[in-house]
Image (cartoon, coloured by chain):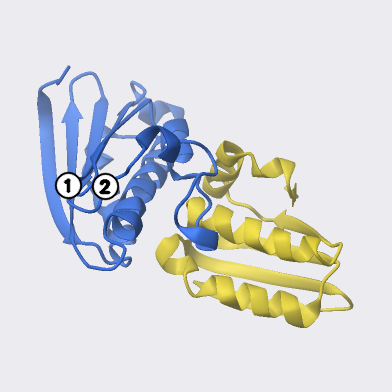
Chain colours: A yellow, B blue
Amino acid sequence: MEIQERAGERTLLLAFSGEMDHHGVRDTLRRVELAIDAALPKTLTLDFGGVTFMDSSGIALILRAQQRVQLLDGNVVLRNVPQQARRVLDAAGISRLVTIKS
Amino acid sequence: MKKASVNEVKLVFPSRSSNEGFARGAMACFVAQMDPTLSELEDMKTAVSEAVTNAILHAYPDTIGAVYMKIRICQENLLEVTVRDRGKGILDVKQARQPMFTTGGEERSGMGFTIMESFMDHVTVRSTPGRGTTVVMRKRLSEKSRERI
């Protein structure tokens, strides 16, 4: 899985592409944490536009990012979530914890 | 109640994480003959991904073992996917099926079984500690699904 990062004034955009399964996420979690620790964002935007598949491994990634950003009094926004990933988020009840922009 | 299958395939692969994508793709190829809708196909791929990931990650945490997958197409548009391992097994299946329960640490969400249950019609889990786990998932696909895409 690929990640593109763009940091601004206490904002961070992480754009993912590829398959967000256990295999794809394994090395990505650490990179997401490092990016958050460097940017200290008030708003973390996770762009799922390039995600071709997501399972519960993606839920773990979102929850971990959300916990880290919450320590900074920040919030997490998901955008460009494809239909398949959206159904996984809904099944897991994630829409209660993060903002999902359509 | 076991139904006679119209067609079936069996796969055995080592518990390497790179085989998660293979298992989903192989399942998608085989069920193409059922002419599923896109959302049905995505649901089945997601459920298979969860079951296979459990086998790879939890059944064989420190070793590489065999994962057995059987896909059966039965009458009346019924699909049955069985994912079996001979790994360490689950001590308490009821607890393992609870949302957010995981022994996998921060990398896992504990939502695998919840997602299997949401996306398939029926999920059965049998496990014996030290002997392995068998997950059987069934889903009945819609008739004439092609017209509904």
Q: Residue at x 19, y 31 (%)?
A: B73
Residue B47 circle label: none
> Toward which corner of the image does residue B34 lie, by quadrant?
top left
Please state which amino acid type lies under the numbered disc 1. Answer: Arg
The furthest residue to the bottom: A38
Position of B62 with respect to A57 (left or right) is left
Q: Is residue A88 left or right of residue B65?
A: right
Q: Which residue is mark 2?
A: B89
Residue A88, horizontal then vertical, whole percent: 54, 44
Q: How many marks?
A: 2
Is the residue marked by circle 1 packed among few (<14), some (14-19), or many (20+) residues within 10 Å? few
The Cα–Cα distance between marks 1 and 2, rounded to whole angstroms, is 6 Å
Judge left or right: residue B129 versus residue A34: left
| Mark drawn on residue B131 | 1
Amino acid beneath label 2: Gly
Dot 1 and dot 2 residues touching (CB under 8 Å): yes
Same chain for labels 1 and 2? Say yes or no.
yes
Task: Give the percent coordinates (x, y) of residue B118.
Answer: 47, 32
> Is A75 drawn above or below residue A6 in the view shown?
above
Residue in the image at 65% along x and 44% along y = A94
Can residue A98 be seen in the rendering of this structure?
Answer: yes
In front here: B107 or A39? B107
Q: Chain of mark 2?
A: B
Within 10 Å of the Cα at label 2, are there few (<14), some (14-19), or many (20+) other Cα atoms? Answer: many
* Residue B120 versus residue B101 in the image, above or below: above
